[in-house]
Each structure stands twice: as C-alpha cells, then as structure tokens.
Amino acid sequence: MGLLSSFSQWRETRYQNHISNMRDQGKCPDCQGRGYTVYPYNEFAYFNSFDCPSCQGSGSFSYWETLR
C-alpha cells in the first residue's frame, strides 16, 4: 500500500506543479494556452480541433480558474 500511496502523492504533486507553472505564465493548464484541443478523428484521418472546454477557447488561466 505504501507504493500506491506514494505514486498517488507523486501524481498530485506533479499536477500541482503544472498548475502553478501555468498560473505563472497565465495560460490554461488543459490546452497550454492554445485555446483549442485536438481530438484524433481516427488513426488514419485528419485531426479535429475544438475550443478548449475548460477555458472556452480563451487560453487564459484566469478564465480557466473562474470556470473551474
């Protein structure tokens, strides 16, 4: 059980570091400030891009934080 809890703690720490880095840069943590996310249509065709559902396409951290 110690291994599973340490892995869970490592993942949470890594996520919090990612959030703080994106806060410092002013970017949305989910789309890295691009304003869109890319979903593969299938492995042989093109990729579809959609507005980021977390920041509604703005790419800013402050907007992401208010919607969260």
Image (cartoon, rainbow, N blue to C red):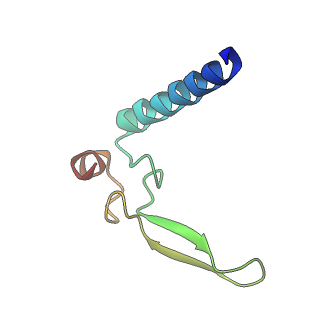
Q: Quadrant of residue 10?
A: top right
Above or below 9: residue 27: below
User: Residue placed farthest to the left in the image?
Assistant: 66
Above or below 2: residue 31: below
Q: Quadrant of residue 44?
A: bottom right
Above or below 54: residue 14: above
Give the side of residue 57 with respect to residue 16, left or right: left
| Closer to us: 33 or 5 | 5
Above or below 51: residue 12: above
Give the side of residue 40 with respect to residue 16, left or right: right
User: Residue placed farthest to the top in the image?
Assistant: 2
**Residue 60: percent from left, percent from top:** 32, 51
Residue at image position (41%, 30%) is 20
**Residue 2: percent from left, percent from top:** 67, 14
Q: How many marks?
A: 0
Quadrant including the N terminus:
top right
User: Residue placed farthest to the bottom in the image?
Assistant: 45
Residue at image position (46%, 51%) is 30
**Residue 21: percent from left, percent from top:** 45, 32
Residue at image position (56%, 69%) is 38
| Closer to us: 45 or 6 | 6
User: Residue placed farthest to the right in the image?
Assistant: 44
Give the side of residue 43 with respect to residue 36, left or right: right
**Residue 9: percent from left, percent from top:** 56, 22
